[in-house]
Image (spheres, rainbow, N blue to C red):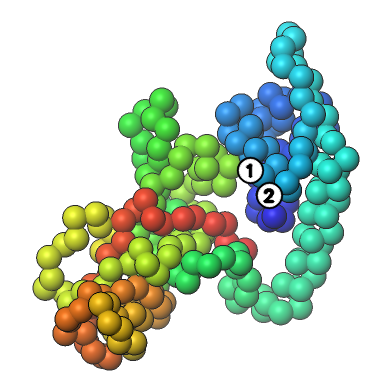
């Protein structure tokens, strides 16, 4: 569960409770009806019990009310948000990046900002998000239109680009481009952990950010050598920063 200011799902749940309508909550949040339902479904899956009791039909699109579980979730979100803001105010300096990020098994967290959002029209369910990495370099992420709406993505927005280490292929700069790779990040090997069929490689990219990936054996990668990291844009997950 995120905190309200950075998690539109919580905002939508709050608006459902305020307006008594999922369609009105979607309009107030500035997202589509489909995206609002996706937000509610996601939160319900995480909570393990219904958060909204809705009735379909009627001139206003049906009514909806929060269940006791939904009310408890909102109260917990408000308390977590207050606690989080208090901690960050004490830890972060005025000019320092936030020392907090999503808790996830993904090892790669890269600071970036949104450059542009592209799709093949309003009916296209996918959106390609072009990103500028904080230390230089570019990256792209392919996500659903509803996810882009719920994150409130727009040019200039600070985000975290996440990806699993197993989705990153590292090789020498002169190697062939992998068939399923659309993002190429040049860098320099920081360290290599040798394995049986593949090596785990830490590469410094975009000035000073580290990217963890794997290189097939045999390879010529050594600490200090130049390398190219590849990752498919469908494997890049976006999270709001700060």
Where residue 196 appears, as percent x and y from the top left, is 27, 82
Residue, x 81% and y 49% (percent of image)?
Answer: 73
Q: Can you say whether 37 is above or below 152 in the image?
A: above
- For residue 42, the mark is 1
Quarter assignment of residue 37: top right
**Residue at the spot x=65%, y=38% of the render?**
41
Q: Which quadrant would the N terminus be assigned to in this image?
A: bottom right
Q: Residues within 10 Å of mark 2 (few under 14, many from 20)?
A: few
Badge 1 crowding class, 10 Å Cα cut-off, few under 14, some 14 to 19, many 20 or more, is few
Quadrant that contains the C terminus: bottom right
Horizontally, residue 37 falls left or right of residue 229, namely right
Q: Which residue is mark 2?
A: 46
Picture layout, residue 191 above or below residue 179:
below
User: On screen, 204 above or below 37?
Assistant: below
Q: Are the residues tagged 1 and 2 within 8 Å (C-beta)?
A: yes
Task: Name, please, the residue furthest toward the front.
Answer: 196
């Amino acid at each position: 569960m995120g905190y309200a200011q950075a998690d539109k799902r919580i905002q939508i749940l709050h608006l459902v409770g305020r307006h008594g309508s999922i369609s009105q909550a979607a309009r107030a949040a500035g997202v589509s009806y489909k995206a609002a339902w996706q937000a509610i479904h996601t939160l319900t899956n995480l909570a393990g019990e219904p958060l909204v009791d809705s009735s379909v039909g009627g001139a206003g699109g049906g009514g909806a009310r929060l269940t006791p579980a939904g009310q408890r979730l909102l109260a917990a979100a408000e308390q977590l948000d207050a606690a989080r803001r208090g901690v960050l105010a004490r830890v972060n300096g005025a000019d320092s990046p936030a020392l907090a990020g999503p808790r996830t098994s993904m090892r790669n967290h890269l600071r970036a900002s949104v450059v542009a959002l592209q799709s093949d029209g309003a009916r296209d369910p996918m959106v390609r998000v072009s990103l500028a990495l904080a230390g230089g370099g570019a990256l792209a992420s392919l996500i659903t239109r509803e996810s882009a709406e719920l994150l409130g993505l727009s040019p200039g927005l600070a985000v975290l680009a996440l990806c699993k280490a197993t989705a990153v292929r590292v090789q020498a700069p002169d190697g062939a481009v992998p068939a399923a790779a659309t993002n190429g990040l040049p860098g320099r090997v920081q360290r290599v952990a040798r394995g049986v069929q593949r090596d785990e490689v830490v590469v410094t990219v975009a000035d000073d950010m580290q990217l963890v990936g794997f290189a097939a054996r045999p390879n010529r990668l050594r600490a200090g050598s130049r390398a190219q990291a590849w990752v498919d844009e469908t494997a890049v997950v976006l999270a709001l920063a700060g």
